[in-house]
C-alpha cells in the first residue's frame, strides 16, 4: 500500500498548483476542489489501511538520508515555491546512512512538509527549512523540519507528546499524517517530537539511529 503514497502526494501537489492557476475561474476551481476532496479521501483510506496492515515484508537496507531529502524537495519544491513557500536544505558534507526503507522515510518527510506547508498557507509567503545533522557516530541522526507558520500552543504540544492515533489541529484533517509518520519511524527505531510557540513557527524533530 505504501508504494502509492508518493505518487498520490505528487498528484495532490499538482492539483493545488492548478487550483492556484485557475483561482479566477470559479467553475474550474470548484471542479478541482472536488477532485482534491476525493483524492484526500483516497489518501486517508490508504493511510488507515497502513495503520492496520502488517509490517512491511521488505528487508531493511542502508538508506542515504541526504538522497531521501533531496528527492522529496525535488518532488514538491517547485509547487511549494509557486504557492509562496520556499524550501531550504542544510545538509552535512559527509554521507549520513540509516537502516530501513527509503520510500517509507520519504513518506515521513512528505507528511511533515505538508504539515509545515499547511501552517504557512494563511500567510502571503513563508519558508520551511530542512536541517540534517549527525555530529558523532554515537549520536542519532537528526532531521529538523522548521516552518515559520502559525506555530503551536503549549496545549497542542502537550497533546502531541501523548502520541494520539489521530490528533490534528486542522478542522478538516484526520491527523493521519502524524500517526503514519510515527508508525514508520517506530519501524526504523526512530522518534518524532515537536517544538514551537504560537506565532513563532513549528519544528518537527526526527531522530534515527545511524549506521556506524
Image: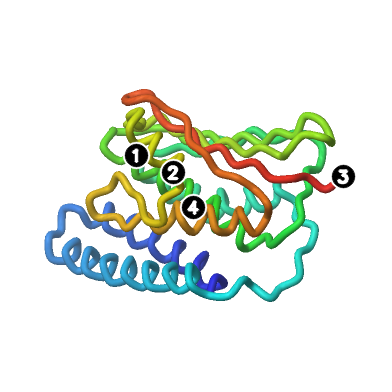
Classify mark 3: residues with Cα within 10 Å, few (<14), some (14-19) or many (20+). Answer: few
Which of the labelled discs sits on residue 119, or is there none?
1
Residue under label 2: 162
Judging depth in this view, the residue of 41 and 17 nearest the camera is 41
Q: Secondary structure at mark 1?
A: helix
In the picture provided, is 208 more to the left or to the right than 210? left
Q: Quadrant of the C terminus?
A: top right
Q: Nearer the viewer, mark 1 or mark 4?
A: 1
Residue count near mark 1 (Cα–Cα under 10 Å), binned few <14, some 14–19, many ≥20: many
Q: Earlier in the sequence, mark 3 or mark 4?
A: 4
Q: Are marks 2 and 4 in contact (CB under 8 Å)?
A: no
Near mark 4 (Cα within 10 A), the count class, few <14, some 14-19 or many ≥20, is some
**Residue assigned mark 4:** 76
**Where in the figure is residue 128, as x and y percent of width and height?**
48, 36
* Residue picked out by circle 3: 212
Give how far apart the Cα atoms at labels 1 and 3 are: 36 Å
User: Which residue occupies the extreme right position in the image?
Assistant: 212
Instruction: Name the secondary structure under disc 4.
Output: helix
**Mark 1 or mark 4, earlier in chain:** 4
- Distance CA(mark 1)–CA(mark 2): 21 Å
| Mark 3 or mark 2, whichever is nearer to me | 2
Find numbered disc 3 in the image and state the secondary structure of the residue it sits on. Answer: loop
Which residue appears at 44% of the width and 43% of the height?
Answer: 162
Amino acid at each position: 500500500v505504501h508504494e502509492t503514497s508518493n505518487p498520490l502526494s505528487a498528484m495532490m501537489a499538482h492539483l493545488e498548483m492548478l487550483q492556484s492557476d485557475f483561482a479566477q475561474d470559479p467553475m474550474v476551481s470548484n471542479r478541482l476542489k472536488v477532485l482534491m476532496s476525493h483524492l484526500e479521501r483516497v489518501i486517508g483510506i490508504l493511510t488507515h489501511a497502513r495503520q492496520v496492515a502488517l509490517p512491511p515484508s521488505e528487508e531493511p537496507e542502508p538508506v542515504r538520508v541526504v538522497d531521501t531529502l533531496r528527492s522529496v524537495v525535488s518532488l514538491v519544491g517547485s509547487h511549494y515555491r509557486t504557492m509562496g513557500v520556499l524550501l531550504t536544505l542544510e545538509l552535512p558534507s559527509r554521507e549520513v546512512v540509516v537502516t530501513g526503507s527509503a520510500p517509507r522515510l520519504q513518506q515521513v518527510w512528505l507528511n511533515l512538509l505538508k504539515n509545515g506547508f499547511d501552517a504557512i498557507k494563511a500567510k502571503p509567503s513563508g519558508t520551511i527549512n530542512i536541517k540534517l545533522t549527525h555530529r558523532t557516530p554515537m549520536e542519532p541522526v537528526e532531521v529538523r523540519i522548521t516552518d515559520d507558520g502559525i506555530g503551536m500552543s503549549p496545549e497542542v504540544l502537550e497533546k502531541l507528546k501523548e502520541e494520539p492515533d489521530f490528533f490534528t489541529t486542522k478542522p478538516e484533517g484526520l491527523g493521519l499524517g502524524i500517526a503514519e509518520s510515527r508508525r514508520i519511524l517506530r519501524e526504523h527505531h526512530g522518534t518524532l517530537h515537536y517544538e514551537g510557540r504560537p506565532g513563532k513557527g513549528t519544528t518537527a524533530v526526527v531522530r534515527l539511529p545511524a549506521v556506524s
